[in-house]
């Protein structure tokens, strides 16, 4: 018996010591300092300093800058996405009933939410529709709400369409609202000085469906998104991966890769872009990221778009830059950085990136600072990046403020509704030959 207890005691002691050793090893791994890489140039392209600036890294969500460049050059900053609502059946205006289906022809509006659905409900009410006996039928270019890009997207297009149609049906009918939709309505009503107790209401009796480019009928309503520049600003501020929707109709990823390669004067095969959001395994060097930012600004200037109205300013805008880098958002250096964050938790060993423009007493600089292999220590990586930027600002006389853009708008703020009735617009993508007097904008 004594031998048994002695053996048990020795086993427990060994286990305890092993656990202590494992804990110490884990603590040592956690304490391992992060390793920064960076590149800084003047706005004119003169090198300032770098560390491993030509070594490829995963740029994560900084890829969204490339996607924004692509979209602005292809579509222009004032482009608006249209979503068209048709009657498949007839409208009994005396009974305020659509006898048939409401057919929704989306054109890829990437930022359509419950608030936009509220606008549509009000418009349908104005057109004499409060009840639909059929279903809400959407095509595969109608998106509503967030999906987290390719990471969360339903791969089956039919299931995805049904999900989007269900979200629209919910937004149209207050009886179906959940807590989040109710909160969105109250914010919407307050912003627009509407009576919160009287939302628009369209009851859909026949459920939902999707059948692609479905047969159209009489067009009742057109919803036009806010301008593309504002849409991109919202995606960049929150680093939302559904910016992939913007890229969906611009072309294959090969086209974006070629654009970045040409504009940044990169060697063949150095630029590797897998997604338009930064999810997955993408490759750029810190120096190429700096060149990309410079090219992006030049495009914005050519199009008459201030950089701070497309990318977030730390201390001005909500979202990742202000949230992740509080010492840049507050204090003596507030609003001196226009930047884009990038974060991957596990892909390629994890990465944290901050890239953008820094305004100092000695001039303006373009920079990229990153921590590769940041999995499990992203918070420490961001602190190190923030301190690097603060030190750089300090060496150059301190930060100087950028001008804040107007407050970041909600998705419906710049959208508008066109009531059509019996008037018909041309098919999506065709020249608009409708008479200006035939459409009545309702903001």
Image (cartoon, helix red, strand yellow):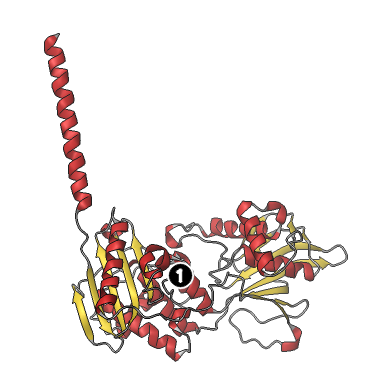
Q: Is residue 343 left or right of residue 211?
A: left
Q: Quadrant of residue 418?
A: bottom right
The relative height of residue 90 versus residue 251 in the rendered view (above or below) is: above
Give x and y (percent) for residue 285: 25, 74
The relative height of residue 259 versus residue 85 in the rendered view (above or below) is: below
Tell me the element at label 1: helix
Which residue occupies 39% across, 84% down? Answer: 297
Q: Which residue is mark 1?
A: 237
Give x and y (percent) for residue 78: 55, 84
Q: Quadrant of residue 442?
A: bottom right
Q: Is residue 72 left or right of residue 199?
A: left
Q: Quadrant of residue 41?
A: bottom left
- Residue found farthest to the front: 332
Which residue occupies 23% across, 50% down? Answer: 30
Q: Looking at the rendering, in which quadrant would you find the N terminus?
A: top left
Q: Looking at the rendering, in which quadrant would you find the C terminus?
A: bottom right
Give x and y (percent) for residue 323: 42, 63
Mark yes or no: residue 276 visible.
no
């Amino acid at each position: 018996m004594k031998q048994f207890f002695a053996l048990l005691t020795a086993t427990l002691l060994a286990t305890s010591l092993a656990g202590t050793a494992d804990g110490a090893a884990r603590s040592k791994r956690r304490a391992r300092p992060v390793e920064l890489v960076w590149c800084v140039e003047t706005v004119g392209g003169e090198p300032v300093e770098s560390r491993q600036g030509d070594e490829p890294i995963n740029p994560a969500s900084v890829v969204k800058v490339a996607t924004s460049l692509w979209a602005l050059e292809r579509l222009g900053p004032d482009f608006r996405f249209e979503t068209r609502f048709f009657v498949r059946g007839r409208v009994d205006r005396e009974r305020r009933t659509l006898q048939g289906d409401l057919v929704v022809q989306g054109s890829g509006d990437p930022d359509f939410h419950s608030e936009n659905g509220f606008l549509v409900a009000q418009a349908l009410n104005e057109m004499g529709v409060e009840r639909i006996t059929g279903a809400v039928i959407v095509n595969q270019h109608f998106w509503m709400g967030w999906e987290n890009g390719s990471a969360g997207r339903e791969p089956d297009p039919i299931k995805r369409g049904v999900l989007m149609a269900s979200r629209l049906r919910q937004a149209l009918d207050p009886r179906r609202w959940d807590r989040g939709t109710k909160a969105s309505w109250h914010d919407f009503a307050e912003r627009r000085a509407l009576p919160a107790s009287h939302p628009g209401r369209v009851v859909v009796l026949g459920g939902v469906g999707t059948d692609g480019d479905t047969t159209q009928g009489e067009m009742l309503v057109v919803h036009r998104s806010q301008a593309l520049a504002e849409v991109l600003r919202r995606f960049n501020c929150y680093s939302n991966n559904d910016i992939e929707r913007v890229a969906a109709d611009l072309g294959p990823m090969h086209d974006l890769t070629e654009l970045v390669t040409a504009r940044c004067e990169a060697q063949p095969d150095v630029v590797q872009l897998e997604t338009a959001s930064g999810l997955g395994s993408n490759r750029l060097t810190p120096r190429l990221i700096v060149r990309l930012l410079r090219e992006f600004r030049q495009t914005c200037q050519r199009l008459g778009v201030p950089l701070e109205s497309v990318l977030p300013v730390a201390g001005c805008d909500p979202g990742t830059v202000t949230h992740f880098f509080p010492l840049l958002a507050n204090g003596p250096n507030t609003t001196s950085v226009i930047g884009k964050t990038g974060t991957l938790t596990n892909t390629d060993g994890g990465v944290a990136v901050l890239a953008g423009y820094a305004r100092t007493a000695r001039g303006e600089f373009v920079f990229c600072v990153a921590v590769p292999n940041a999995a499990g220590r992203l918070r420490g990586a961001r602190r190190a990046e923030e301190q690097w930027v603060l030190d750089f600002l300090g060496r150059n006389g301190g930060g100087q403020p950028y001008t804040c853009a107007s407050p970041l708008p909600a998705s419906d703020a710049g959208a508008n509704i066109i009531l059509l009735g019996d008037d018909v617009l041309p098919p999506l993508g065709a020249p608009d030959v409708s008479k200006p007097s035939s459409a009545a904008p309702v903001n």
